[in-house]
Amino acid sequence: MGEAAPAMTPVRTTCPYCGVGCGIVATPDGQGGAEIAGDPEHPASRGRLCSKGAALGETLSLEDRLRHPEIDGRRVSWDRALDAVAQGIGEVVAQHGPEAVAFYVSGQLLTEDYYAANKLSKGFLGTANIDTNSRLCMASSVAGHKRAFGSDTVPGLYEDFELADLVVLVGSNLAWCHPVLFQRLEAAKRERPHTKIVVIDPRRTETCDIADLHLALKPGSDVALFNGLLAELERRGARAKRFVERHTIGLDDALIAARATDLGDCDLPAGDMATFFDWFAKAEKTVTLYSQGVNQSSAGVDKVNALINCHLLTGRIGRPGMGPFSITGQPNAMGGREVGALSNTLAAHMEFTPADIDRVGRFWRATRMARRPGLKAVDLFDALGRGEIKAVWIMATNPAASLPNADAVRAALKGCELSIVSEAVRASDTVDACRIRLPALAWAEKDGTVTNSERGISRQRPFLPPPDEARQDWWIIAEVARRLGFGEAFAWRSAADIFREHAALSAFENEGTRDFDIGAHADLDDRGYETLAPFVWPAPAGDKPSANSEGGRFFAEGGFFHPDRRARFIVIAPREPLHAPTDEWPLRLNTGRVRDQWHTMTRTGKSVRLAGHRPEPTIELHQIDATARHLADGDIAEVTSLWGRAALRVHVTDALRPGDAFAAMHWTAQVSRAGRINAAVNPAVDPISGQPELKHTPVEIRRLPILWHGTILARRPVMLPEVSYWARIRGAGYHAWLLAGEQPLETARRALSAAVRATNPGPWLDGQQGLGAVIGDGRLEAVLALGETCNEAVRDRLAPFMAIGRLGVEQRNLLLRGDDAADGVVWRGGEICACFGVSCAAVETAIADGAASLDAIGAITRAGTNCGSCRPEIRALVRAARPRKAA
């Protein structure tokens, strides 16, 4: 395995967050931490980092790590844990067959880890029941690519966004979910002001800040819009006749379906649609970038193909500045696609055809090849719940929180005979539910490769040593394989060995018949692997140009991967989401991400500065819907569906269409037990891709009869009594809890003060305004503030007291009176810039003092001068201030 770097030695590695694949330079400090900076030489990011990437140095502590193997909560040796896994899997296969075993893996794995898991499952256990959490983010894109192109091929490159004259963003909040690409696009528009940007999204997101046109279409109507575009392009004579005739089939039937589509289903102004159609028809260099708003749908594959149809008709594919582009959500979702870790693919972009099964079996010298696709994620956990899956091994992911109908997933795990988890963290919703826990390496310790959304493969290099007994996932898999009798096929000494095998398989009997080919690296020596620079595939052996790609792009001159080498136009009829709103469940729930958090917060939740922007789980809804339900900002509301419930803080906004609601998916039982929105999300899936419909669940929202709101700041964990709502946030040397409940205020005060004192020793002092504190030897150990109304300023007011090493008499009196720690300390109004800890109040003060531009505000506050993720929100504050100044 790779060695950790000596102190103060910079290491080039790759960010562990989204699919942009930004380069990072990490310099370990010799004390378990590291300084993090953007890598100016990395082609994906060119030195840029978003707020999450910039804060990675704050997430490296070990207090929450799983450091030793455990069985049923008791520490055991590695030999005992590995023997238990191997024996258990062997017995299940012997008694129930290989289909009773399943793996659920992750886009957080490195390609080498992915490869090992896929090889064990499909080549030696004989089951394709291995699926990845990438099923939740881009499976519909995979299926759409295969239907259209004959392969799961992303045709273009990131630079196409910068070269395009029209960029269409569909179902993508690029500003928050892929901030570095948003920065590149924003910079390109400044340099080429004629570039048009269209955002297609039911929500008005921060990405709309740079849009020339926002189409807030009815949720689920994407197919209707792009069918209408296809018909209009044909009517205008925009067909690329030579390209269509030579390289495609099926246009006539696709046009019949498109012309039959009712554009009224989109619920958009006719003039806005006409403008979009006109811009698309006239702009030869057009890129359509799409993400989860397209993929996470029961019609996700159809949506993908509807937009690809428009690029095939116009021939705008595979050339600079044009093409459809799927932006992935995870750092190595693409690597998982390459190795075949989706249950319906085999390996190295090969499928479950007799020829491919034979080819891969011969290459692996497999003893028991899987011969048919396995269960996709939602179906896999349904089968687990029914008892059909007897053993499940989960790696580097948290399905008990991230899958839809999450309570059922958790129950299925708890009822499983053999539940195994390889994980870096000690506590998560999934770890808590599994019997055997195997300590895996985290990002800073791993050695391997990842692939980003533009097919760019980069090295991930370790710069910190493994903690205690933690091991890399491929090693754990290989050790289990050895105990199962497959040691010869898994006798790797390093990640480099696995990468060479992976590269060799990609080239094996390829001859240009498959898109994925990195055979040029099959003979890479260890030193070459260590120094491997980022590259975009294909990279065939001999460095010969691929017959199907040019300049790193695919399909400019055809060369598709269907047997006849032609692309397919797909006939698509619009269809509604599987579960429509009803009188009982009249609102449409959409779920997604917020700017400064990632997945289920096991990493970003450790950063103090990332906690400030959106500290609580919220339910956003339009003023019309809020008024009808007697809801206001700051209330606690219950979100219910046929599948479950959640309790969240209310945020009223005009950024949503009436009838729509939005909630972020990050909060888990570890940080907000009632805030787990996926407990309420429906488990409907696309019939082709199996991707869940995370963007459309019928719900109702009602105000909970909250009698009190509270805040706790404490240096030690607090075991809370039962309350209706709580959210835990990381502070500087303490944790904060924001709470609300339905019991009488005095009852809550007694229960909460007892809970605080139980773990934070010292004298309890009662103060004014519903405040009480534990102060030991002059140090504030914990403070509790309760009141009948929600006061968002309390946490900001109390936090400075936690930073004081020893309270003086006057400071203690200020605290207990409910006053500020020092003159001039005012409510921050929420954080806007995570990079520099700049509050909304600071930006608003700068604007009031005359700063009227981003540059001027940045010069005064530094906000918006680093990663740029907060720039849309700063612009919104500037716009909001103009009417007030005019008045």
Image (cartoon, rainbow, N blue to C red):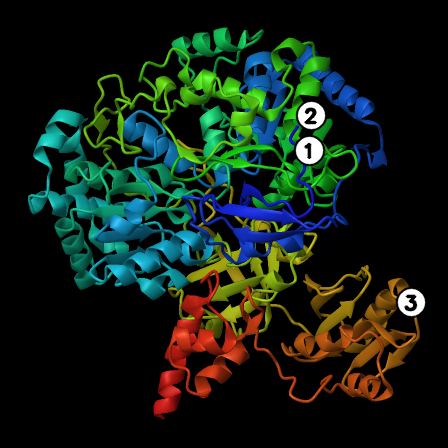
Q: Position of residue 722 (x, y in %)?
A: 77, 61
Q: Mark 3 and mark 1: span between their CA atoms?
A: 36 Å
> Any mark on residue 422, and which?
1
Give the residue type that dot 2 points to.
Answer: Ile
Is 736 displayed left or right of 554 in the figure?
right
Q: Give above or below for 172 relative to 649.
A: above
Q: Position of residue 317 (x, y in %)?
A: 23, 37
Q: Nearer the viewer, residue 426 or 851?
A: 851
User: Who's the residue at 7% across and 47% down the image?
Assistant: 236
Q: Please, which residue is most extreme toward the bottom here?
A: 887
Q: Earlier in the sequence, mark 3 or mark 1?
A: 1
Q: Are marks 2 and 1 in contact (CB under 8 Å)?
A: yes
Q: Residues within 10 Å of mark 3 (few under 14, many from 20)?
A: some
Q: Mark 2 and mark 3: span between their CA atoms?
A: 42 Å
Is 705 displayed left or right of 546 in the figure?
right
Q: Residues within 10 Å of mark 2 (few under 14, many from 20)?
A: many
User: To which quarter of the image does residue 575 belong?
Assistant: top left
SS category of the residue bearing label 1: strand
Q: Residues within 10 Å of mark 1 (few under 14, many from 20)?
A: many
Which residue is tagged 3?
A: 761
